[in-house]
């Protein structure tokens, strides 16, 4: 900055020089010039009001809430609005179901061009709307940018405070961090590199500037609750780092909406925002020369942040945040790709929370990212591991029998509440529908593959365990509740059931049998009339029960029937010979083990499924289930 020199100042300098030259003492000149600097120059560079801001001036209130008022739901079953989700976003793949049940959140792709169009779809579909912290932070940064510019415009005559009010000017620290991120994107997202540069960006003991504080928010990742949350937040982090502060007016098509809203706040970012607001308030207090309009903007922003700090689900959402979903400032522009390229297809983040003791699901459109050359960045990808057979189990597995194949085969009968007056044996045949659904959800959550009888036969022939955790679910007797209750639950979770139908007296008719077969269920024979085959001696009757039943069911479904289930689990050598000659590849009985031998394909052991989840987990690990 050029100094304005008064005649008194010029005279003082000339006098000092003449005196020093005349005396011949050079050191005296240095002393007098130092005196001149302290008397005149320093006053020019410091604001007349002694303007300065310290870290202590903007310190956030220690009472600020630092924990979320909500938590991700622990999904024992899919939420009640799952059918609505599939209607709007299509059928969930097995891995999407596993992800959703395991982490209570999942990304689903859907054709839409940008975030505001995505939110418009949610509004029109009357789906619950999620507004993530990243979008709120972006809005606040644009408001701070507006206030910053107003402050600068109102203090044009005082260039000394310009460095305190500027935004978007990359400092040497930011340049260093940006270079590090671009060179080490994957490891940066894993928090393995650029730690030194980040520590400088987030060091709150530094003398603050607005540029420093807003950069600290920009490079602050969201807190994560699990590994999938980290994956999602990495994409949000990319959006946050790519986005500029340019303010864009709301869409002319903006309108009110009645959807339920939830703000997914991150209090580590709220803390950063509080520092920024405190900084603006401190500047306003120390200079006290801003217009009423600028002061009002600061006050409004301070009020908004106060509401965010106190927010809990059910509170009235601030209008500025509610309107954010229609604001074009959310959308990335083509040149906002400093660190990675936004994918061509947007995703919708479906996230379930436990709010007021109720599971509620909210949705937000988000950008996903890939490398600038369209290559995948490992930290921006997520995969469910299908080679999970040797991954830990909830119950320590029993020692597997040598030479056997470990695939639990479960046996179900009635999927219904236990009727009153049943004895212990008959009561044990019932599994309550909710308990059954929890068991199916558990299988999906732990990425079990459910297989058909033929798939089981193929694995058994290899004599080796599958690479993926695998089970076979069987249903005996063809009772109607298996079709009305069990089958819909299996379909909902993308699972396969093997239904052993009594061909001539089943509670499930032929049309229902075919429907189940057409929708991925496997149909096996449970004989024609369910006799005790060990007591049947007439060859023609044995043939009718074992052979003819197979052909009858094949005619009903139009598909091969490859497995047989012994009525009452009973068999003898004669029965076995008929089953073998009929063309069945496997046949199932009862037992207490989940390990079967390739040489015993026609006498496979099944374990009885009870309603208890503890029993179910035990059986999956080969431990006793009673």
Image (cartoon, helix red, strand yellow):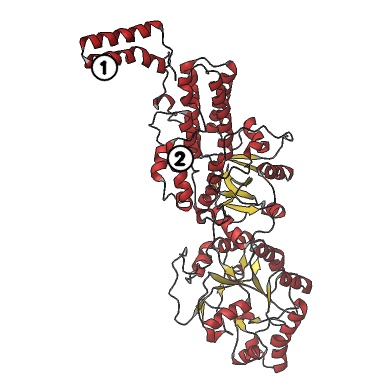
| Of marks 1 and 2, the one in the foreground | 1
Q: Quadrant of residue 305?
A: top right
Please name whichever residue, 356 or 369, is drawn nearer the observer in this view of the structure. 369
Look at mark 1 in the image and give the residue it sits on.
30
Quadrant location of the N terminus in the rendered image: top left
**Residue 25: quarter of image:** top left
Query: Of marks 1 and 2, which one's residue comes earlier in the chain?
Result: 1
Q: Which mark is residue 175?
A: 2
Q: Tell me: 135 left or right of 22.
A: right
Foreground pick, 271 / 166: 166
Looking at the picture, how far across and down is residue 332, in whole percent?
Answer: 62, 42
Q: Nearer the viewer, residue 573 or 214?
A: 214
- Extreme residue in the right direction: 511
Secondary structure of residue under mark 2: helix
Give percent across and percent down for residue 533: 65, 86
Residue 40's quadrant in the figure?
A: top left
């Amino acid at each position: 900055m050029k100094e304005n020199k008064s005649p008194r100042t010029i005279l003082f300098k000339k006098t000092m020089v003449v005196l020093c030259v005349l005396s011949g003492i050079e050191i005296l000149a240095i002393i007098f010039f130092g005196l001149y600097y302290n008397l005149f120059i320093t006053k020019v560079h410091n604001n007349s009001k002694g303007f300065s801001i310290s870290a202590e001036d903007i310190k956030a209130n220690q009472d600020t809430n630092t924990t979320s008022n909500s938590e991700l739901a622990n999904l024992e079953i899919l939420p009640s609005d799952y059918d609505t989700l599939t209607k709007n976003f299509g059928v969930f793949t097995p891995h999407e179901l596993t992800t959703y049940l395991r982490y209570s959140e999942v990304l689903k792709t859907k054709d839409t061009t940008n975030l505001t169009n995505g939110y418009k779809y949610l509004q029109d579909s009357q789906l619950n709307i999620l507004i993530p912290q990243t979008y709120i932070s972006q809005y606040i940064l644009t408001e701070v940018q507006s206030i910053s510019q107003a402050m600068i415009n109102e203090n044009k005559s005082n260039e000394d405070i310009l460095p305190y009010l500027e935004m978007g000017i990359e400092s040497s620290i930011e340049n260093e961090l940006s270079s590090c991120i671009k060179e080490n994107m994957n490891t940066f997202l894993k928090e393995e590199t650029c730690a030194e540069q980040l520590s400088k960006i987030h060091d709150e003991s530094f003398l603050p500037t607005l540029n420093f504080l807003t950069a600290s928010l920009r490079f602050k990742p969201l807190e994560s609750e699990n590994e999938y949350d980290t994956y999602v937040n990495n994409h949000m982090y990319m959006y946050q780092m790519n986005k500029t502060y340019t303010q864009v007016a709301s869409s002319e098509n903006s309108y009110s909406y009645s959807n339920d809203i939830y703000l997914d706040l991150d209090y580590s970012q709220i803390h950063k925002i509080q520092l920024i607001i405190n900084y603006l308030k401190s500047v306003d207090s120390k200079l006290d020369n801003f217009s009423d309009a600028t002061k009002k903007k600061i006050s409004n922003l301070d009020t908004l942040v106060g509401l965010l700090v106190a927010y809990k689900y059910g509170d009235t959402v601030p209008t500025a945040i509610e309107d954010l979903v229609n604001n074009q400032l959310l959308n990335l522009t083509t040149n906002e790709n400093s660190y990675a390229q936004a994918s061509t297809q947007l995703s919708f983040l479906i996230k379930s929370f436990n709010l007021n003791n109720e599971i509620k699901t909210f949705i937000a459109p988000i950008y996903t990212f890939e490398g600038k050359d369209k290559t995948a960045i490992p930290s921006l990808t997520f995969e469910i591991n299908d080679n999970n057979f040797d991954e830990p189990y909830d119950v320590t597995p029993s020692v597997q029998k040598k030479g056997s194949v470990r695939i639990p085969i479960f046996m179900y009968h009635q999927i219904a509440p236990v009727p009153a007056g049943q004895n212990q044996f008959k009561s044990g045949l019932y599994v309550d529908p909710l308990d059954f659904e929890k068991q199916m959800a558990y299988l999906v959550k732990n990425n079990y593959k459910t297989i058909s009888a033929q798939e089981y036969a193929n694995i058994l022939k290899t004599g080796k365990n599958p690479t993926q955790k695998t089970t076979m679910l069987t249903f005996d007797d063809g009772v109607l509740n298996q079709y009305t209750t069990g089958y819909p639950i299996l379909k909902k979770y993308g699972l396969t059931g093997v239904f052993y139908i009594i061909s001539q007296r089943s509670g499930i008719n032929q049309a229902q049998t075919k429907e189940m077969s057409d929708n991925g269920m496997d149909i096996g024979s449970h004989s024609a009339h369910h006799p005790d085959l060990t007591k049947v001696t007439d060859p023609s009757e044995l043939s009718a029960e074992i052979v003819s039943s197979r052909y009858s069911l094949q005619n009903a479904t139009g598909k091969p029937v490859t497995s047989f289930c012994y009525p009452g689990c009973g068999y003898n050598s004669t029965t076995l010979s008929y089953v073998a000659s009929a063309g069945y590849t496997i046949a199932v009985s009862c037992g207490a083990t989940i390990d079967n031998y390739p040489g015993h394909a026609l006498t496979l052991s099944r374990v009885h499924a009870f309603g208890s989840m503890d029993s179910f987990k035990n059986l999956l690990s080969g431990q006793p289930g009673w």
